[in-house]
Image (cartoon, helix red, strand yellow):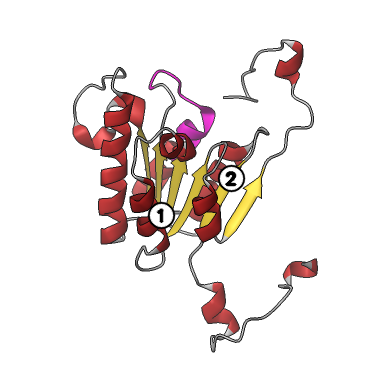
Amino acid sequence: MPQGQPDAVPHDGLTTRERRQQPLLMVHTGDGKGKSTAAFGLAIRAWNQGWDVGVFQFVKSAKWRIGEQTVLERLGELHQQTGEGGPVEWHKMGAGWSWSRKAGDETDHAAGAAAGWAEIKRRLAEETHDLYVLDEFTYVMEWGWVDLDDVIQTLSQRPGRQYVVVTGRRAHPRLIEVADLVTEMTKVKHQMDRGQKGQKGIEW
């Protein structure tokens, strides 16, 4: 695809502009580092275009605050103060989800995942956000914490112009099938293989 030119142009009756505006379901999967990092970079790019961004973190502990969360939340505050960029919401399953207004109970991860997915479904139906980042969502699909058929149908039939990026290892083949863009991060080397733990500014 040199210079951003597609390999083929479908005979769908759409103009180049109309085809360019079609929303995407994107998946970042594989064993390599960088799946979430790439998704959060995409969120920053979307903010710069004035998009409404919703980030939903599954699996990660509420006690672990990553650097991208601080950056995106501050960008959301900047939007509120100046109108620059777009609004940003960041929700984390381990915190009991922000909209529940109660302390999280990390002992019942499955219930938390189901509650998070139910809220995302509601927001997709209401076309709340322009970009949804479902971070580490492949795991809750793999573990059966959400219904696979429901997820596939909801994401593939979402209304309007809503973009979704899903991150996590071992993306289900059905998710890959319905996605528009799939990137597999392949690990070649990782410093943790030699016993070096994560570092500030690199892992968080």
Q: Which residue is mark 1?
A: 152
Q: Position of residue 146 (x, y in %)?
A: 34, 40
The quarter of the displayed image where residue 91 is located: top left
Whichever of callouts 1 and 2 sits on the residue coming sooner in the sequence is: 2
* Left or right for 186, reference 126: right
Image side of residue 26 versus residue 52, left or right:
right
In magenta, the rendered stretch is 62-72
Determine whether, in the image, residue 147 is placed left or right of residue 30.
left
Q: Residue furthest top?
A: 195
Mark 2 is on which residue type?
His
Mark seen at residue 28: 2
- The answer to which of 155 and 55 lies nearer the viewer is 155
Q: Establish if 157 lies above or below 183.
A: below
Residue 70 shown in magenta: yes
Residue 116: x and y in percent read 30, 39
Seen at 42% across and 28% down, the residue is 59
Give the residue type at disc 1. Answer: Ile
The image position of residue 156, as x and y in percent, is 42, 61
Q: CA distance from mark 1 to mark 2?
A: 16 Å
Q: In this image, 81 relative to 47: left or right?
A: left
- The residue under the point 42% across, 32% down is 143
Would you place residue 199 above or below residue 14 in this image? Answer: above
Can residue 48 be seen here? The reply is no
> Can you tell which mark lies on residue 84?
none
Asked if the magenta segment contains residue 56, the reply would be: no
Q: Position of residue 65 (x, y in %)?
A: 45, 24
Element under disc 1: helix
Badge 2: residue crowd in 10 Å (few <14, some 14–19, many ≥20): many
